Amino acid sequence: MEANFTDLDDEALIQWICKGRHEAFAALVKRHSKRFYSFAYLIIFNKNDAEDIVQEAFLKLWNRPELWDPGRQVKFTTWFYRVIRNLCLDHNKKKKPLSLSEDMQLSNKQPGQEILLNQKQKQEQLDSLIQELPERQQLALNLCFYEELSNKEAAEIIGVNVKALQSLIMRAKTTLKEKVEKYLDRGLI
């Protein structure tokens, strides 16, 4: 009997992927690619690089599906967030992020309506400020606020307990607030 792959849970899909079933892999990619792309983008801040990272992660899964061990009692998505996170962090170590002034200069060259450009510049400035945070604070913000994961899930992905996650979020918010206030005082935002 042929399985309807879209109805299977992630664990069952990976069992089929271990048997070389492309349909199971396609169903898993379709189910999760948008979510993981969004997450990668929030760390990388580059559309093409985020797409490449997600593609690389899925290819690793296709080539070595046994890397995810259901016996460890970790959901597939939690484990895969870690895979994406690690690839993003490796990418960021290799690539120097743009400074806020360089980012603003690039934004000023983009055509478009003034209001949309202004909103885009503000978002890019905020993204730049988030990029300046320590990695774990960035991850905590991204997982909890952009990915809307629970604190428990986010803590598992980062590898800390829930109290430590909450501390990371509070420190990140405090730092961002201070930086935004500084930029507002200078008239840069």
Image (cartoon, rainbow, N blue to C red):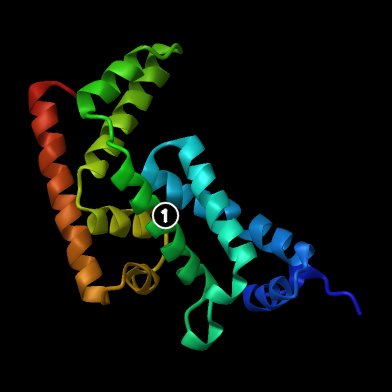
- Which quarter of the picture shows residue 15? bottom right
Foreground of the two, 40 or 55: 55
**Label 1: element kind:** helix
Residue tagged by mark 1? 87
Tell me the residue at 63%/78% (across/down): 11
Quarter the C terminus occupies? top left
Snapshot quadrant of residue 176: top left
Please, what is the three-letter code of the amino acid marked with disc 1?
Leu
Question: At which x and y percent is residue 155?
Answer: 32, 71
- Work out whether residue 105 or residue 19 is closer to the camera in this orientation and state it: 19
Residue 17 in percent (x, y) is at 70, 71
Above-or-below relation of 4 to 132: below
Left or right side of 180 for 14: right
Which residue is depicted at the point 42% across and 20% down? 116
* Residue 4, placed above or below residue 72: above
Q: Is 32 left or right of 141, judged from the image as shown? A: right
Q: Quadrant of the N terminus?
A: bottom right
21 is higher (above) or lower (below) than 34: below
Q: Position of residue 16 (x, y in %)?
A: 73, 75
Task: Name, please, the residue furthest toward the right.
Answer: 1
